[in-house]
Image (cartoon, rainbow, N blue to C red):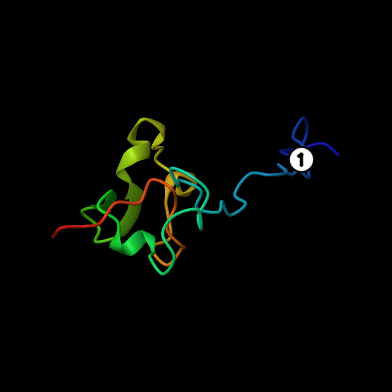
Amino acid sequence: MNGPMLGRVKNPPVRVGKGTPTQPNGHFARPGTGPAGETCKTCAHRVRRELRSGRVFQKCGKTKARWTGGRGSDIRVTDAACAGWEKDEA
């Protein structure tokens, strides 16, 4: 085993947990605790963050202090309204 492979790991260890998909969990309160028939899409606190690449991420304005650069602080606009829901006047 002389040559360029000497001292190198042939099969590097696999990182468990890295790159696994994260579920959106950026709600102010548990979805479904708000008014019946309303969703995050109709809430005044919904924020659309659009990147230069054109990708859009939905966030809850009431949880701005907890926003990250990842999917974990996103919300799904189709989720039932939470206890922090307020009518969107726009």
**43 versus 12 height, above or below:** below
Q: Is residue 77 left or right of residue 46?
A: right
Q: Residues within 10 Å of mark 1 (few under 14, many from 20)?
A: few
Give the residue drawn at x 50%, y 55%. Answer: 31
Q: Is residue 66 left or right of residue 47?
A: right
Q: Which residue is at the front of the view, 64 or 5?
A: 64
Residue at the disc numbered 1: 13
Give the residue drawn at x 24%, y 52%. Answer: 44
Image coords of residue 45 (percent x, y)? 28, 48
Give the residue drawn at x 78%, y 43%. Answer: 10
Q: Which residue is at the front of the view, 47 or 23?
A: 47
Q: Quadrant of residue 62?
A: top left
Q: Quadrant of the C terminus?
A: bottom left
Q: Quadrant of the N terminus?
A: top right
Name, please, the residue furthest toward the front.
35
The reply to whether residue 13 is in sight is yes
